[in-house]
Amino acid sequence: MSVAAHSFIVGSQPTVQYPLTGVRADVMMAAHVASEVAVKLMQPGNTNSQVTQAISKVAEAYGVFTVAGVLSHKLKRFVIDGNKAIAMCDDAEHKVETHTFELNEAYAVDIVMSSGDGRLKEAEARATIFKRAVDKSYRLKMRASRYLFNEVNARFPALPFTLRSFNDERQARMGIVECLKHELLQAYPVLYAKQGDYVVQFKFTVLILPSGPTRITGVTCDLDGVQSEKTVNAEVNVILAQSTKKKKRRPRKKPNARSSVRGVAPS
């Protein structure tokens, strides 16, 4: 199981001759650099707190804010939000336990930066994506609710879904209210930033392999046309200079039996 999300610049694309500058360039570069730093720190033995602290330092360097409440979760088979998580910032409302990265783990890394205060809010748009809350149970009253819940258990027991996926969409829309009321389903709300703020998100899947952390989803970000006047400090540059791949040790050649035998001079 793997996930991905990308950010795009709407309208004319920036180039080297006509680059993206100002606060938009700052938030774009902050999200990109934070993504690179996170991957490099996801080594066996390192902790999620190290990643959180490094991401916060990147945001501070570019004068932007990490978006509160965003978590990067460990992935398992049929589980997209495992117990192990990485917070974007040290937020008292969204505390996560400190844990150590282990070999052969997979994570959905979610990097979201904002040029505003980092607080996104729900607005008038209704949620269209939902997920089953496997730890909740309730005896539903409405027929439409039972139809929806049975369909979810049969077709989407662990992964998110949209109401358009059901044959009887009208029944599904009627039944979603009761399912949400009794917390059988979780909604993925549509979040809004303040007018004039810019938000950039990069989400990708990382495997912690013996050869090093490997990003297996996500597109390559072309930053030739993005020019920020700000840069990270020396501490972050040290992290960026690290290699994510471990050098393979070449097996030593065994000495040739013939060459190791010395000739004996005749007496």
Image (cartoon, rainbow, N blue to C red):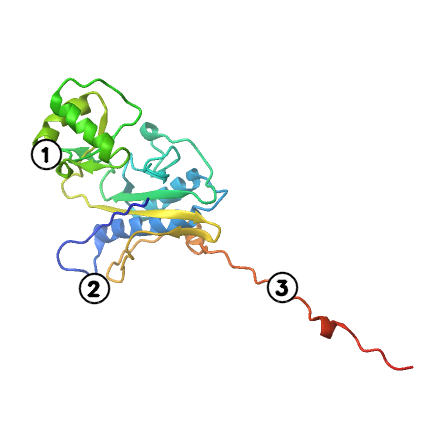
- Under circle 3, the secondary element is loop
Instruction: Evaluate if marks 3 and 1 touch, with contact meaning CB atoms under 8 Å apart.
Output: no
- Please tell me which residue is depicted at 25% across the width and 58% down the height of the picture: 226
Check disc 2 and report its element: helix, strand or loop: loop
Front label number (3 vs 1): 1
Residue 169 tag number = 1
The CA span between labels 2 and 3 is: 49 Å
Residue 200 percent across, percent down from the top left = 24, 47
Q: Position of residue 106 (x, y in %)?
A: 39, 43
Front residue of 113/146: it is: 146
Q: How much space separates mark 3 and mark 1, taking CA atoms?
A: 65 Å
Q: What type is the residue that disc 1 sits on?
A: Glu
Which residue reaches farthest right?
A: 267
At a point 69% along the width and 68% down the height, the residue shown is 255
Query: Which residue is drawn at the image coordinates 47% and 41% (left, top)?
Result: 102
Q: Residues within 10 Å of mark 2 (few under 14, many from 20)?
A: some
Q: Position of residue 69 (x, y in %)?
A: 29, 34
Q: Amino acid at mark 3?
A: Arg
Q: Earlier in the sequence, mark 2 or mark 3?
A: 2
Q: Is residue 52 above or below residue 171?
A: below
* Label pair 2/3, CB-CB below 8 angstroms: no
According to the picture, the residue beneath numbered tag 2 turns out to be: 15
**Is tag 1's residue or tag 2's residue first in the polypeptide sequence?**
2
